[in-house]
Image (tube, grey):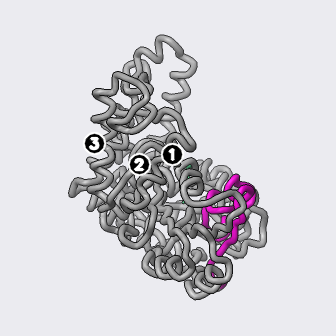
Amino acid sequence: MSASRHPALSATDPELASFVAAEETLQAETLRLIPSENYVSAAVLEASGTVLQNKYSEGYPGRRYYEGQQNIDRVEALAVERAKGLFGVDHANVQPYSGSPANLAVYLAFAKPGDTVMGMALPMGGHLTHGWGVSATGSWFRGVQYGVRPGTGLIDYDAVRDQALAERPKIIFCGGTALPRTIDFAAFASIAEEAGSVLVADVAHIAGLIAGGAHPSPAGHVDVISTTTHKTLRGPRGAMLMCREEHAKAIDKAVFPGLQGGPHNQTTAGIAVALHEAAQPAFVSYAHAVVANAKALAQALLERGFDLVSGGTDNHLILIDLTGKDVPGKVAAKALDRAGIVVNYNTVPFDTRKPFDPSGIRIGTPSLTSRGLSTEHMPQVAEWIARAVDAAAKADESALAVVRAEVTALMSAFPAPGLPLS
Ligand SMILES: *Cc1c(COP(=O)(O)O)cnc(C)c1O
C-alpha cells in the first residue's frame, strides 16, 4: 500500500515507510475518539508536504530578512486573509509552530516574568500553558488558577470574578482541553475589563466549531484569540494568534523575533487550505454534526449508566468519570485501545487519583464525524465503550477482541479523509 502511495519514501527508507503504512492502517481501522485529533483532507496533506519546506522566510510578508519570497509571501498573506475572514478579526499571525509556543508568545507580548497570570487549573480542564506549575508559564510567571464548581462541573463566573479582582492578573486565559460546555466569552470579558487584564481565549479545541458556527465566537469579546489549527479546525499541526489591531504589533513582535525564527511555510500552506475548506458550507454542516454526534453519544452513555462531568456536553467533547466503575481511567483507556477505540485517560475535576493514573477518560467526535458517522451510530459507539469498560474490569481479553472486530468492520465502511482506501 505504502509503496504506491509514497514511492520515493518506500525506495529510500523502507523501514520508516513501513511505520507510516502501519499508522495509515491503524488510523483507518480504529475508532478514534481523542477530541484533540482529526483527519486532515488529502489537500491539506499535499500542501503540508510541498517544497515550501525548503524556504527560509524570517519576518512577515513584504518585510523579510531573506530574498526569494515572491511565492512564500503570497502563501502567508493568503493564510492571513483567510483567517481574518473566517474568524472576523482585525489581525492574524499564522506563524506559531504550535499551540504551546503561540501561548508563550502571548506572555511575551503582555507580561514580564514574575507577573501574575490566571487560567483554568489543569486538573479542572485547563491547559498546561495557562500558568500551570510544571509548565514554563507556571515557573516564569505567578500562575493563579480557577476551576469548576463541585457537583455541577461548570465554571463559577462569580468566583472567577472575585479571584480576578483580588489577584489583578496581567493576563486571563479562558478555554481549555477538557471543557465539555460552552464558554461564556462575554462574561470573561467583563471580568477582565474590571480586573484590568488582557483576556485571551484559547480556542485550540473548538476553533472548528467556532468557524462553523457551532460555538459562539470570542471575536469582539477578547483581546487575543489563540488557537491550534489541527484539532476541530482540521488543518496541519500549527497555530494562529488573532487580535484587534491595537495588539497586532505586540503579537507579531512576540512571535518573531521574540520567540521563533523562520516560519514553517509548508505548514502555513496547509493552514491556508484548511481555512479555505472551513469557509465552505460543508464545514458548517461538519461543525454542527460534530456537536450533534457528541450530544447523541453523551445521551447514549448516560443511558448505559456512565457518569459524565457536567452531565453531558455542548460541544465536541465528553469527559467520562469512571469513579463509580471498578476500573480507573488508565486501565479503561488501555483496554479500549485493544478494542480498537482510541481515547485518552484524563483527570476529572476534584479527582481523588493521580494525574498519571486518573479517574476519567476523555472522548470526542471530531474524527468520527470527519469519516461520516452520524447520530444513528452513537448508540453503537456507546455500547462498544460500555462493553470494553466492562471487559477491562473483568480482564476479559476475548470480549475486547470481539469489540475490535466489530469496530474494524464498521470503520471499513467509512473511509477517512486523507487515508488510502483499504
Ligand atoms: C492543544 C492545546 C494547546 C497546545 O497545543 P500544542 O499544539 O499541543 O502545543 C494549547 N491550549 C489548548 C487549550 C489546547 O487544547
**Spatial CA span between label 3 and label 1:** 19 Å
Q: Which residues are magenta?
A: 122-150
Comes first in the chain, label 3 or label 1: 3
The reply to whether residue 390 is in sight is no
Comes first in the chain, label 3 or label 2: 3
What amino acid is labelled 3 in the image?
Leu
Query: Which numbered marker is on residue 255?
Result: 1
Element type at marker 3?
A: helix
Would you call the spot at circle 1 few (<14 residues within 10 Å), some (14-19), or many (20 or more)?
Answer: many
Report which residue position mark 3 lands on. 78
The relative height of residue 28 versus residue 229 in the rendered view (above or below) is above
Toward the viewer: 104 or 124?
A: 104
Q: Is residue 356 left or right of residue 296?
A: right
**Spatial CA span between label 1 and label 2:** 8 Å
The answer to which image quadrant residue 232 occupies is: bottom left
Element type at marker 2?
A: strand
Report which residue position mark 2 lands on. 93
Element type at marker 1?
A: helix
Say if the magenta span includes residue 417.
Answer: no
The relative height of residue 23 versus residue 12 in the rendered view (above or below) is below
